[in-house]
Amino acid sequence: MQSVSGGPRLLWSSLRRVAVIFREGLEPNRRLHFLYRQTRSKRQHFRVVKTSTALHLLHTCRLATFHTPKLVRSVSTLLARNFSTMPEKREFKRLPTDVVPSNYNIRLKPDLDAFVFQGQEEIDVEVKASTDTVTVNSLDITINEVTYASGDTSVAAEVSVDKEAETATFKFPSALQPGKGVLKVSYTGELNDKMKGFYRSKYTMPDGQERFGAVTQFEATDARRAFPGWDEPAVKASFDVTLVVPKEKVALSNMPVKSDTPDKDPNWRVVEYDRTPVMSTYLLAFIVGDYDYVEGKDADGVVLRVYTPVGKKEQGNFALDVAVKTLPFYKDYFGIPYPLPKMDLIAIADFASGAMENWGLVTYRETALLVDPANTSARVKQWVALVVGHELAHQWFGNLVTMEWWTNLWLNEGFASWIEYLCVDECFPEYDIWTQFVNMDLGRALELDALHTSHPIEVPVGHPAEVDEIFDAISYSKGASVIRMLHDYLGNEDFRKGMNKYLTQHQYKNTVTEDLWVSLGEASGKPVAKMMDTWTKQMGFPVIKVSERQDGDKRILTISQEKFCADGKLPAGDKSSWLVPISFSTAGSPTTPVKTIMLEGQSSEVTLDNVKAGEWVKVNTNTVGVYRVQYTTEMLAALIPAVKDRSLPPRDRLGLQNDLFALARAGMAASEDVLKVAEAFINEDNYTVWNDLALNLSSMAVLLQYTDCYDLYKAFARDLFSQVAKTVGWDKKEGESQLTAMLRDLILTKMGRYGDEPTVAEARKRFESHYKGDNVISPDLRAPVFITVLSQGKSEDFDKMLELYDKADMQEEKSRIGRALGAVKDEELIKRVHEFAMTDKVRAQDTVFVLAGATGSAKGRELTWSFVKENWKEMHERYHSFLLARLVKSSTENFATEEMAQAVEEFFKANPAPAAERTVQQSVENIRLNARWMKESADKVCQFLKSRK
C-alpha cells in the first residue's frame, strides 16, 4: 500500500485541526461537522472522518483531556497507523462553474441487439468566465466529436477522459469568451447490465419469447453513463429529448410526446418529447420496450398511466387508483399544483431499488407496482400503496425543490418516507398505517442509530460514490421519524403553511436543510432550527429516564436524558444533548397527552395534575418521539395490566415492548424480565404490535440457537402465539380487514417455524393440494405454508417448490418462493439454495434476498457466509450499490462470537467493499453486541425458560 504524499505535514495539519476542536471547547455534536469543514478541501482527511478510523479517532478524542500534547500523542498514534496503510486518494472536486448549461437537446438511438446506443447532444451553455477548457461528467461513454458554436464561430475541442474522476475535459484551441453558445457532442455508449445509467432489461413476452428493453436509473450519479453533462443536482437545466427506436416499441420520457414520425429507415421511428421544466440530471428518464398500460385522470385533469408487462395491464389498476387519489392530495397539502401535464408509472423487470421518482416517469420494480387480485398478498398491496405515495411526493419535494448536494439526501428521502404514510392514511384509513410506521420506520431507525457506527442524518458527502452508503435507515427511517416528531410538535396547520412557503420560495431551485427550518420556523413561530439541528447534525438519540413520586393528586416526574447506546456504554465525556418534545399520557387520558414539554437540558421535573396513586403514566404518547424510555420498576409494573387489557393504545403497547427489548440488549434491563413482560401480550389482537413483538423475539431466538435451550424458547413462543393463532385461524372470514389477513400470515409463519405440530400438518395438507392444482392457496397464506413446509427439510418438497417457481408468471410469486427457500435446515438443501440464487432463473436484483433467506438458522448462516466469501469476486462485480450492503448485512450481522467479528473484519480488510464500508463496521459491532449478550444474558434466559416446564 502506498502512503499518502506529504505524510508528516498532512498528519501534523490534521492533529492541529483536531486540537482546535477541543481548544475551542466545541460540544461533541459539533465536532464531526467542524472537522469536516476544516478538512473538506483535502480528500485524504475526509476519508478519515468517514471511515471507522474516524470513529476511533473521535472516540479517543473524547477520552482525552483538553491538554493538547496528550491529545496529539493519542491521535498521532491512530493517524500514523491508519494513514500509513491507506492508498493515495485523489482529491474530489465538483465541476467548475465557469461554464454552465441551460438546456440539453439529447438524441439517442439504442440498439437492443448489440446493446449499444448512439447519442448526440446540443447543450445551450453560458460561459461565465473566459476559459479554454470545459469539464463535464462522463462515464463509460466514447466521445467522438465536440464543438462549441457561438454566433458564426465554431471550434472543435480535443477530448481527454479521467475515468477515476468520471469526467471528460474538452480543450479548445483558444479561450471561450463570456456569453452564450452551444456545445455539441456526438458519442456512443453501452446499454450495460449493471442496472444503472442507460441499461438493458430482459423480460418475457406472453408467447415465451425473451426480449430486451432499454431503461434508465440515474440517481445518484449515473446520468453521466447516458450523456456527457453536469451531473450534479445543483446544476439544473431543461431537457429536449428525442428517441430513435424500433417502430413497434413503446418509447417514454418525462414529458408528453411532441411528435412521433417514421425514420428514414422504415424499421425505426423518431419520437420527440416536450421540453421539461428546469430540473436536475438524475431525474431525467427514458424507456424503450414492450408494455401495456391502463389510463386515468385525476380530479385536476392530469393524465395518469400505469405501464405493465404485455398482457398484464389489469395488474396496474390498483396503483392507478392510488395515483389518481394521491396527486390531488399532495396538490392540496402543499398548496401547489402538480407542475407536469402527465404522470407515468412503469414496472421495470430489472431494477435495483424499489422505485425511482423521475419527474413525470416514475420507475418501479414489478413487485412495488403490480397487484394481481388472485396472487397479491395484503402485505404487498399495502407496500405498493406506500411506494406509490412515496415517489409521487418526490414530484414536489425533491423534483420541484431539490437538495443542493448529496449531503442533504435525507431531506428528499426522509420527508417522502414520512408523507407517504400521511397519504396512505388518507386513501386507506383502514390500514392503521401510523401504527405500522412505529414498527417499520421508527423501530428500524432506533435500532441502527444506537450503534457507535451509525452516522448523523446530515452526513457530509464528498465524492458522489459515497452516496450509496447513506441510502439507509438513517436517511430514510430516522429522517421520517424526526419529521413526524416535528409535525406533531408544530401541529398540522403550521406545518402545512411552512411547507407551502418552502416549496413556493424555492421551486425549480436547490436548497439545504436550513432552508426548510427557516420556512417552518417562520410559519410556526417556534425555534425549529434550534430544535432540529440537535436531531440532524449529531448522531444518535436519547434515552429518557423517568422516576416519580406522588403528592396528593399530583404525580411529580423527574426526567433526564443521555445518549442511548446499543451496548449501554456511553463514551466517556459524552455530553450529547437534544431538544426533546416529551408528551405524557395517563390511565385517565390514554390517547391524548395530558402535558407536553420541551426538554432542553439534561433533566427536568414535571408535575401532572389529577393523577391518582396507582394510575399508570406513559411517557411518549403514541410513540411519536425519537427516543427510548426507561421507567422505574414500579412505573413499568403499573403499565403491565394496561397491556394485558389493551387499555394502553396499540402504538404505546408497541413502543413499550420495543424499548424494553432494546434496553435489555444494552444491559440496562434483564432479558428474562423482558420475556415476562412479553407474556402480558397473550391477549394482543393488533397486527402491528404482534409484528414488532415477533421481530424482537426473533432477534433473541437467533442467539438462543447457539444454546441448548432453543427448543424451550420455541415452546415459549408457541404458547405466546397460540391464542391469537386460534383467533385468526386458517381461513378468511367474511368482512375481515386487510390487517387480519396480514396478522394470519405473520402468526402462522411463526407457529410453523417454531414447529407447532397442528400448524405443520395443516400447512403440508394445503401445500400438497396447491402443488397438484386442486385448491390454490390464497396469496396471504402462501408464505406461511411455503416456509413451514420447507422448514421440515424434505428434498422432495424443495423440488416441488422449484417447480412452482418455474411455473410462476408473476414476479411477486417468484420473489415469495425465492425468499422462502432458505427456510430449509438440511445442509445439502441450503447449498442448493445458494446455487439456485446464482442461476439465471433469479434476477440479479433478487439474488441477495434469496441468499438472505438462508441465514435464519445457525447452520444456514455459517454456510451462507462461506458461500459469500467463496463468490465474493463475482458478488462485488455484480453489485456496486446498496444491494452489496444488504448482502454484507444479512450474511454477517447475526453471528455471536468475538472470533467471528474478527474474521469478518479481516475478510473485508483483504477484500474492500467501498459501497458497504459502513455496513461492515455496523455488522461487526452487532456481532460483538451479540457476543456480549451471549456472555451476560443467555444463561439467565435459559434458566427462565427451564423454570416454565
Image (tube, grey):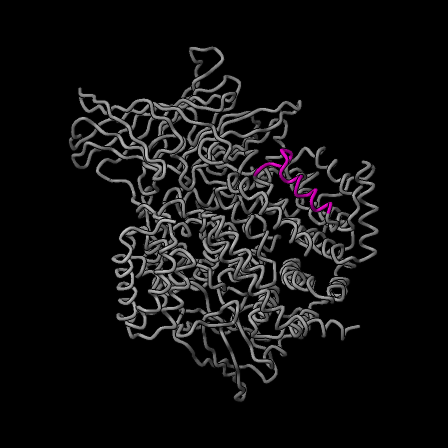
How far from the left and from the top, in percent, is residue 609?
51, 81
- Does residue 79 appear in the picture of this structure? yes
Q: Nearer the viewer, residue 68 or 801?
A: 68
- Residue 231 is situated, as x and y percent measured from the top left of the image, at 35, 38
Image quarter where the C terminus lies is bottom right
Q: Looking at the image, which is closer to me, 205 or 789?
A: 789
> In the displayed structure, would residue 836 be above or below residue 151?
below
Q: Is residue 125 left or right of residue 752?
A: left
Residue at image x 27%, y 56%? 10
| Residue 948 higher or lower than 553, as above or below | above
> In the image, is residue 338 above or below residue 441?
above
Query: Is residue 758 magenta-colored?
Result: no
Q: Position of residue 605 (x, y in %)?
A: 45, 81
Q: Residue shown at 50%/46% (left/top)?
A: 882
Q: Give the range drawn in magenta.
A: 828-844
Quadrant housing residue 536? bottom left
Q: Is residue 690 above or below residue 231?
A: below
Could you tell me what secondary structure mostly forms the magenta stretch? helix
Answer with the quarter of the image where residue 713 lies: bottom right
**Would you say 148 lies left or right of 327 here?**
left
Q: Does the magenta segment cover residue 839?
A: yes
Give 327 or 398, whichever is nearer the viewer: 398
Q: Which residue is drawn at 52% across and 88% down?
A: 551
Q: Can residue 278 be seen in this view?
A: no
